[in-house]
Every structure is written in structure tokens, then in C-alpha cells.
Image: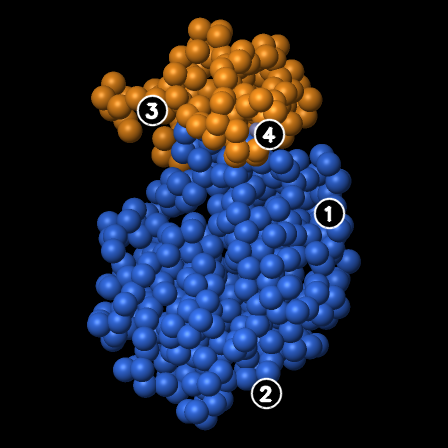
């Protein structure tokens, strides 16, 4: 996927990244309040099919994280980097933590999502900055 | 209900064999299984074969017929099962169902994986396809990183240390010392494990299974067939279970528990009419040290948060109450992904029937094998019992 210009968009996913980059992140919510990232037609928790776009909270809390030292070829020059799962209420997001020294990252750190570009492949990547 | 018997088992050496093709690896393992089974090749009715990344490592799809041909049964219906690291666990489960249903009396099951020809970076990339490509892989999540996220969540929730994880690696290396099929037949120390380079914190090199080439095979036969043909097949597959979960960690209800494996275990125990307390020995999917911890809790040998110290306390070592991974596990014996599920059945069969170098450590007649795919989005659990 080094020829990033030519990559066909992934509907839903790329729309989500576009929205996050604009500061207008969203997620899909079912009537029961279960949240998911697109594309999604059925709530895997309760089976509801009437999912609605709702705004993503501005910040979330790091729930778990790891500093990656051995990466796949697409990310070799990005190492070491921190990948984290952060809790945004109804949804969790997986992204890289930027602008913080790896040693300073801790569970509970408040972060806000954004879209960056990887060093190795120049691909878009979901990332978090301290909030 | 008639339980299928394991009438023969075979393995290749698990290790670094970058130049050996998948078809050659599987030919060797299946040849050994047939020899061990004492059944005529012509009586095999079908092949259930597990493989994960052959499309990437060997540019080879449609591996079912290719592997049947390699095993010398080109006309047999042959299907390749793919369920990440649980590929041949699923292949076994489907074979068990077919034998029980009376669809088949003699089935060859197995799996193979060629990995080392891709190198470390290539393998890291290939293994990552077991995760959610959009929301995990594109955020830089590797397979070790995913398990590191689970380990970190476990430590945070229940407590635990890198030392306790290292004890699991030390135990599994010790278990592999006499296993001629194992990739590593050398002991390691806790200090060595702790000093090894980090892969994805808190997991270091010695928390991870190696990159392995290898194949496994087993011949499953119906009870009736074993009896009619006077086969010496004392081990029966008496329980089978499979569980699923959402693909991405971020969408799971738990980050430090594996409900797919809990469901698979419950189903397999009920199927066999046993409970966790009846199990004397187990082979579990320790692709990373933390994975063994999660497996032991999912199998209900320990409550959540309790299994982290099991190896350090000596409960799961070869002299412990319930030895875990007497083969060396994925950690020391190796993890040729698509071969692993059947290889666990092979090792458990040898352990229970008494011809495994570690059979003397087995203190009962009921064993369990646990094979997990991805970050445990799919799992199979099987119960094996001595039935003379
Ligand atoms: Zn719902």
C-alpha cells in the first residue's frame, strides 16, 4: 500500500477519519446506547439496525497501551511508537499516542483523537494527543 | 453418541525450515500419522486441513486438494480451514462432527505453515491480518502489540508482573527439553527472559513464541471402525467446543478476559460430561506468556486474576497439580500457525497414551487442548480421554 494516492477508499472508515481530521468525529449508536465505528449496519450487541451518527466526545481516557518496538514493514521507521485503546464512553478507539514521551503515558491519560501521517509509509493513522 | 478415536498422529520437526514447502511439510506429518494409525491410505475419506497465511507466504491458495495430493489421497474431498491461529483446531472440530454424524469413518486432519521464508518483518505483517485491518492494523497494531495491550490491561485490573510471565516461559522451555519436535530444546532463566529485548511492552522477546515452520496430522476414526479393524487407539475425542467474540479488542466487553474461550470450554466440558476439576493435563495456546494466563482462566482452572502466578507457584509445572503445556507449548515447541491446533491434539494423544517423553508427568486420563485465533476472537477447546 505504498502507492497511497491510488488506494481506493474504504467507505465508512475513511469517512470516519475525514471527520476526525475535521474535528467532527462521530460514531454510530443504537437505541440501547451501544456505540460502534463505521461501517456497521447491525448492532452486534443487541441486533438493532437503526444506528444513528452521534458526535464523538472530544476526549477519552487511555484504557491500555503498549510501546511497539518491532513493527511490520509499514511502520518500521515509526518505531518505537505507542499504540493505545482509549475509552470514549460508548466506543473505544485504537490509535497511536503522539506528543508524549512513551514513558509518560499512563492508564487514565486524557487524550483527544486526530489523524496523522505515518513516517514509514505516509499513510493516514488515527492518533491521540494529550487533551 | 460415538466418540472419534485418535488412531494415529504425526508431526514434522517444528523449527526454522525456510526452504521447505508447505506441501512437503504436510506430506511428512501425514505420512507419520498414517504409519502410526495403521490404517490403509486408501481408506481415508476426507482431509480437513488448517492453514492461515499460505496465500501470503507461499502465494498459494486452494490448499485443500494440494495437501490431499501431497498426502497421497488426491481424490479425497479436501477442505482448507482458516481461522487464524485456530485454523487446525477448527479442522479437528469439523472432523469430530463428521465422524459423530456418521458422515465419515476415517478422516485425516492436520495443518501446516511455512513462515520463516518471509523473515521477521514479513511474518509480523502477515500475522497482523488476523486483527481488524481498518481499526487495528492501520493504527500500527501488530500481533504482539495486541497481546501486550491485553497484558497491560490484565496487570492494571488484577495485578501481575513481568517476572510472573517470565516463569511461564521458563516452565515451557523446561517442558520442551526432551521433545525432539520442539524448536527450542534449551532451558532459559527468568533473568534472561527479563533482559531480552522488548517487542511490545510489557512483552519481550522471551514472552513470544518463535516463528516456526512445521506441520501436524492425525487420523480420526469412528469407534466402530476402530473396533472392527482392531486398531490400537486408546485415546478418544470426547468433547468439542468453539466460541467467538468481536474481532477488534476495542469492541470487546473485556480486555483482560477471553469469553470466546470461556464459551468453547463450557461447551466442550458439557459435551464430554466433565468439569474443569476432572482435567489432569492441558495444552493451551500460549502464543505469548500472557495468553497462557488468559487460557487457564477461560478454562476455569483459575478465577479471573488468579492464573498469573500459577507457574511461579509451581502449580502448572511438570511436577505441579495440573501440568500445562508439557509439549513446551507454542512458546518453546513452536507455533507454525495453521499446524498448531492439530499439533496440540497430537501432543495430548501421546501424553495420554504414554509414548510422550513427558507422559510420566501426567497424573490422570483426561486432557484438554485450547487453540485460539487472533486475539481470541475464535477458539476451539477439545477434551481427550483414555478409553480402553
Ligand atoms: Zn445495541
Q: Secondary structure at mark 4?
A: strand
Q: Quadrant of ligand 1?
A: top right
Please determine if labels 1 and 3 lie on a single subunit. Answer: no
Residue occupying the point 73% across, 43% down: B160
The chain identifier of the residue carrying mark 2 reads B
**Which residue carries the number 2 mark?**
B388
**Which residue carries the number 1 mark?**
B304
Please determine if labels 3 and 4 lie on a single subunit. Answer: yes
The chain identifier of the residue carrying mark 1 reads B
**Which residue carries the number 4 mark?**
A65
Q: Position of B197 compared to B122: left or right?
A: right
Residue occupying the point 64% across, 64% down: B270
Q: Position of residue B44 (x, y in %)?
A: 32, 78
Looking at the image, is mark 2 or mark 1 nearer the viewer?
Answer: 2
Mark 2: few/some/many CA within 10 Å (<14, 14-19, 20+): few
**Which residue carries the number 3 mark?**
A10
**Colour in which chain A is drawn:** orange
Residue occupying the point 49% across, 23% down: A50
Mark 3: few/some/many CA within 10 Å (<14, 14-19, 20+): few
Q: Relative to A98, say whether B162 is above or below.
A: below
Could you say which quadrant of the image residue B176 lies in?
Answer: bottom right
Amino acid at each position: 500500500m505504498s502507492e497511497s494516492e491510488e488506494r481506493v477508499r474504504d467507505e465508512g472508515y475513511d469517512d470516519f477519519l475525514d471527520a476526525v481530521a475535521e474535528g467532527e468525529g462521530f460514531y454510530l449508536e443504537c437505541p440501547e446506547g451501544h456505540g460502534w465505528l463505521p461501517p456497521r449496519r447491525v448492532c452486534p450487541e443487541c441486533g438493532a439496525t437503526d444506528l444513528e451518527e452521534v458526535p464523538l466526545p472530544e476526549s477519552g481516557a487511555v484504557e491500555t497501551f503498549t510501546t511497539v518496538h518491532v513493527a511490520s514493514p509499514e511502520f518500521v521507521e515509526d518505531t518505537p511508537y505507542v499504540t493505545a485503546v482509549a475509552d470514549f464512553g460508548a466506543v473505544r478507539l485504537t490509535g497511536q499516542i503522539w506528543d508524549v514521551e512513551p514513558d509518560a503515558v499512563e492508564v487514565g491519560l486524557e487524550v483527544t483523537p486526530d489523524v496523522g501521517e505515518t513516517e514509514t509509509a505516509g499513510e493516514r493513522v488515527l492518533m491521540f494527543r494529550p487533551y | 453418541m460415538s466418540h472419534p478415536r485418535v488412531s494415529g498422529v504425526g508431526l514434522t520437526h517444528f523449527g526454522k525450515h525456510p526452504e521447505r514447502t508447505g506441501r512437503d511439510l504436510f506430506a511428512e506429518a501425514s505420512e507419520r500419522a498414517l504409519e502410526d494409525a495403521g490404517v490403509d491410505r486408501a481408506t481415508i475419506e476426507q482431509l480437513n486441513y488448517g492453514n492461515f497465511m499460505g496465500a501470503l507466504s507461499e502465494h498459494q491458495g486452494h490448499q485443500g486438494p494440494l495437501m490431499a495430493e501431497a498426502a497421497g489421497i488426491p481424490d479425497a474431498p479436501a477442505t482448507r480451514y482458516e481461522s487464524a491461529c485456530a485454523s487446525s483446531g477448527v479442522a479437528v472440530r469439523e472432523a469430530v462432527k463428521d465422524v459423530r454424524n456418521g458422515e465419515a469413518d476415517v478422516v485425516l486432519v492436520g495443518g501446516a505453515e511455512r513462515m520463516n521464508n518471509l523473515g521477521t518483518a514479513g511474518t509480523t505483517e502477515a500475522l497482523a491480518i488476523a486483527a481488524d485491518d481498518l481499526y487495528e492494523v492501520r493504527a500500527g497494531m501488530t500481533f504482539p502489540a495486541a497481546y501486550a495491550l491485553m497484558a497491560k490491561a490484565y496487570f492494571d485490573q488484577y495485578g501481575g508482573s513481568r517476572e510472573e510471565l517470565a516463569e511461564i516461559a521458563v516452565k515451557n522451555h523446561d517442558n520442551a527439553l526432551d521433545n525432539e519436535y520442539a524448536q527450542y530444546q534449551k532451558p532459559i532463566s527468568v533473568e534472561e527472559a527479563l533482559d531480552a529485548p522488548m517487542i511490545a511492552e510489557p512483552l519481550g522477546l522471551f514472552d513470544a513464541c518463535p516463528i516456526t515452520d512445521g506441520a501436524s496430522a492425525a487420523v480420526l476414526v469412528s469407534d466402530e471402525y476402530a473396533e472392527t479393524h482392531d486398531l490400537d487407539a486408546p485415546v478418544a475425542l470426547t468433547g468439542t467446543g468453539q466460541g467467538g467474540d468481536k474481532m477488534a479488542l476495542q469492541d470487546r466487553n473485556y480486555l483482560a478476559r477471553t469469553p470466546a474461550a470461556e464459551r468453547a470450554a463450557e461447551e466442550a466440558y458439557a459435551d464430554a460430561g466433565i468439569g474443569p476439576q476432572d482435567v489432569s493435563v492441558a495444552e493451551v495456546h500460549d502464543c505469548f506468556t500472557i495468553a497462557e494466563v488468559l487460557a487457564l482462566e477461560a478454562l476455569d482452572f483459575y478465577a479471573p486474576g488468579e492464573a498469573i502466578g500459577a507457574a511461579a507457584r509451581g502449580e502448572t509445572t511438570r511436577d505441579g497439580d495440573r501440568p500445562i503445556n508439557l509439549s513446551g507449548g507454542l512458546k518453546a515447541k513452536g507455533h507454525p500457525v495453521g499446524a498448531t491446533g492439530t499439533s496440540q491434539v497430537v501432543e495430548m494423544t501421546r501424553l495420554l497414551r504414554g509414548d510422550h517423553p513427558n507422559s510420566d508427568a501426567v497424573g490422570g486420563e483426561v486432557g484438554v487442548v485450547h487453540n485460539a485465533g487472533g486475539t481470541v476472537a475464535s477458539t476451539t477447546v477439545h477434551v481427550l480421554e483414555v478409553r480402553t
